Image: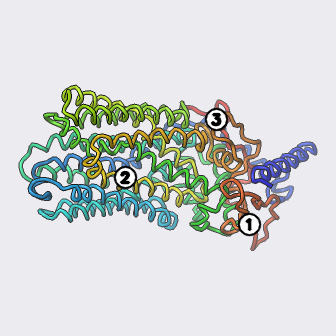
Amino acid sequence: MPLSSSFQKMLGKNKQNDQAGAMSGETTPRNNASVIEKDAVVAEKADVDNSKVRIFTVRVFVMALIVSIGGLIFGYDTGQISGFLEMDDFKNRFGENGAFSNVRSGTIVGLLSIGTLIGAIGSAPIADKFGRKICIITWNIVFIIGVIIQISTTRHWYQVAIGRWVAGLGVGGLSVLTPMYQSETAPRQVRGALVSCYQLFITAGIWLAYIINFGTHNLGGPQQWRIPMGIGFIFPAIMAIGIFFLRESPRWDYRNNHIDRARATIAKSYGVPINHWEVNREMRDIKAKFDAETAGGGKPKWYECFTGPRMGYRTALGITMQALQQLTGANFFFYYGTTVFANIGLSDSFVTSIILGSINFGMTFPGLYVVEHFGRRRALMTGALWMFMCFMVFASVGHFLLQQGVQIHTAGTVMIIFAALFIAGYAMTWGPIVWAVIGELFPTRYRATCMGLSSASNWIWNFLISFFTPFITAAIDYRYGYIFAACSFTAVFVVYFFLCESSGRSLEEIDTMYIMHVKPWQSSKWEPPEEEISTDALYLEPGGRNIRKANAAGMENAHGVEDVPPPTEQHGIHDVSGTDYEAEASGVRQGSIVR
């Protein structure tokens, strides 16, 4: 029986049981509670706070500001190296006869990405064991150590490269933990926008680095590059101190038996009392997932990212989406933009970089609106087509006019215009939305590991582009842009045929769409069943080995537990969520949200 059919059967049986209970006028409490316990539950429910939820609270704003600094750290480091490669003192100290060879420049730029790859993969299991907060603080310290290694060098270019590798470890860890912490802590109604703030802060970091590089590139001596590099200490210090005063992720707290602390964190995130209906609903939801995971053999193994229900499909999709974000070609401008525009013949290429960085930063703000109001799929496909068009013009003008010495001034102007149009499209779509999609794509059971693998894909391609760009442009000049154009065009089909629409849906609904084989091009009109069945609600055996790999990216015939026996004193599943309320729907009550 296909997996989706088995879910429908489970839904039907549960619905029949609910209807039978309604006809008899009785409600069977969880775990067959006694009549006295029923009365206690009814009495407690009378004290539930049913006030409206205020989403945009000071706490949510502060959390988004502090945690998103992880993106600022990466963006600042990306933007500053572009300017360093054109600074006279930096070239004289670390170049070869006052210039950088392709190998040396590619190594200095690219080793950051190797570090981020390792940091991204290693961050997930560490964060699951020690918590999100302590790991965010630790990765910030690692980044600071990397900056110290770089700034303390005088003539050794390999020390700069090693320092960037160490700093990359911190950036990679933060690239996983920043969106993870936000998606696990933020109110679901603004989850997409808050996770996308990571990309907003990346653009802010790039823009800030361009501004500071412009202000120091005419100074004499090592101040040209040491001042911008030294300013890089400020951001991880602020983030490490700020995160210390924030609360731990409620999901991690609950899974580590800090139940009351998890409830308090959720209440503070929504800006409501701890007895509020929204808090009770979310606690019940977390408990149901944790019960299922515990009954399924404890913590999942890493390979379940490929063997779990429809997880092979989703893991491959996450890896592909992060790869395509890099293959759009945005970092071609951010890493080598100053060099590119210097080759065009601009008198001060630092000014052009500031203009492009400002567009990138400014256009990410409307991107936060697009991600919640126009849908992920439509925005990503439109953005990919726009970027395809821009790179086709950029590459054609660069190769057929500028490279041939024909109408150099006109060609340079056109290339700058279409580079700006490209960055505007990227900043509104593929820049922020991919991070939101990755944060929503995976169930809680596998989220940390799958996000680590997806982010690792991003950093692998980041390294390949940053290292090989000098060699490729030397061989095929601006025709390099045709490769990025082709990747953007391919991205349209990947989104259309494989990515389900997740805008406005709960994480449980998104999970249900994938395991029930909802066609992506029909997902925007899909209506969830009355009772959702998600990966986290399946009582899987360890490794999901009871699932035969023949359908749905290898998943069918899920083994689910429909009737859980009542717990005894030593065995069974006990309600430790702090409530005995019946599970409520995961949707949002009509008229209950105040923005």
The mark that comes first in sequence, 3 or 2, is: 2
* Residue in front for this viewpoint, 235 or 373: 373
Which residue is depicted at the point 23% across and 47% down?
82
Query: Distance of mark 3 from mark 1, alpha carbons?
Result: 32 Å
Separation of marks 1 and 2 at Cα, in angstroms:
38 Å
Question: Local crowd at mark 2 within 10 Å, few (<14), some, or many (≥20)?
Answer: many
Label 2 belongs to which residue? 462
Picture disc at residue 524? 3
Question: Which-is-in-front pick, marks 1 and 2?
Answer: 2
Whichever of labels 1 and 2 marks the residue nearer the N terminus, that label is: 2
* Nearer to me, 443 or 428: 428
Residue on which the image places disc 1: 546
Q: Are marks 1 and 2 in contact (CB under 8 Å)?
A: no
Q: Residue at image x 80%, y 48%?
A: 8
**Residue sitting at 78 percent across and 61 percent down?**
561
Establish if 586 lies above or below 115: above
Q: Relative to 483, is 78 on the left or the right?
A: left
Q: Is residue 538 above or below residue 325?
A: below
Disc on res. 565: none
**Residue nearest the viewer, comparing 12 with 95:** 95
Report x, y in % for residue 513: 67, 45
Kind of residue at badge 2: Asn
Q: Which residue occupies the extreme left position in the image?
A: 220
Q: Residue at x 41, y 35 (%)?
A: 387
Q: Quadrant of the N terminus?
A: bottom right
Query: Splitting the image into 4 quarters, where does residue 425 fall?
Result: top left
Q: Secondary structure at mark 2?
A: helix
Q: Amino acid at mark 1?
A: Asn
